[in-house]
Image (cartoon, rainbow, N blue to C red):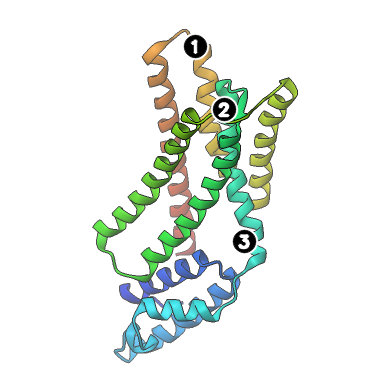
Amino acid sequence: MENLSKESSRFLENLRLYLISSGKNETETEAIVEELHDHLSEAEKQGKNVKDIIGQSPKAYMEQLSGEMEIDFKAMARYIPLIVFGGMAYYVLGDMIDGKRSYSMIELIGYPALSVAFLFMVAAGFRALASRSWGKVGEYSVCGALGIIPIAMFIGLIFLDRSVASPSIALNDTAVLTATIVPILFFIGAAIWMKTWLFIAIPAILFLPRLVVPWLSIGGETSLIVESVLIFGGMAVLLFLMNKKDNNKSAHHG
């Protein structure tokens, strides 16, 4: 494919993000983006720009195109449970490592509900980012909101659980073992299905320090510092390896 101007490339990236976050079929989305790439390439040779091709604002064009495409319910049926169960797997496995042995009805209902709400909130945020020009400050603000709001929601749920009495379910040894093994099997299965080792690497980085540090001859604030260093250090190494892999792939294709 021929190189496009920065404006056209940005438009295609935003269009892809908007359609995918709107639940559209990925294959159809890529076909549309590829076709538009060819049109934009020819238009730029004639001195035209994005607006000359789409005939309206990017936001209006994306909304119109999205309205003409069907929602890919099959993909949503695959990925939404994967994301929700993935979030719950992190939450439950962390609780088992920390020794939690009971759950209130507020927790059992609230955490899955918040996970689904967060998923739709992220999709709405991505569509907003893709459909209009925010500038760097605006983009950071939206991304910051997507990070802060769910944290506030989960903190609110914790306070609600502590303030309102509700029936609770105590876990016996079999339930604890199940609640530990199922998330691990989920991460392994997701890694095999999605063909990426990140589903194993990220949980390992987050949870192994919480298992290893208590066995060391340290305590108090020092153990918390060591645990944090191991987690952030592991994440830094992971990001470095991912960046190196992407650079090698780009160099190979180039």
Amino acid under disc 2: Asp
Q: Residues within 10 Å of mark 3 (few under 14, many from 20)?
A: some
Q: Is residue 241 above or below residue 234?
A: below
Residue 25 versus residue 150: which sits nearer the camera? 150
Where is residue 28? Give x, y as percent: 58, 75
Q: Is residue 107 above or below residue 175?
A: below
Decide which of tag 1 and tag 2 comes sooner along the chain: 2
Residue 71 versus residue 136: which sits nearer the camera? 71
Q: Is residue 135 above or below residue 95?
A: below
Mark 3 lies on residue: 76
Decide which of tag 3 and tag 2 comes sooner along the chain: 3
Amino acid under disc 3: Met
Q: Is residue 231 left or right of residue 57?
A: right
Where is residue 228? Give x, y as percent: 41, 26
Q: Residues within 10 Å of mark 1 (few under 14, many from 20)?
A: few
List the single residue furthest toward the right.
174
Where is residue 124? Give x, y as percent: 44, 61
Image point (62%, 25%), residue name = 102
List the single residue furthest toward the top.
217
Image point (34%, 81%), residue name = 57
Decide which of tag 1 and tag 3 comes sooner along the chain: 3
Q: Nearer the viewer, mark 1 or mark 2?
A: 2
Image point (34%, 82%), residue name = 50
Mark 1 lies on residue: 216
Residue 23 versus residue 10: which sits nearer the camera? 23
Asked whether the beta carbons under mark 1 and mark 2 sit within 8 Å of each other, the answer is no
Specify the label residue 95 is tagged with.
2
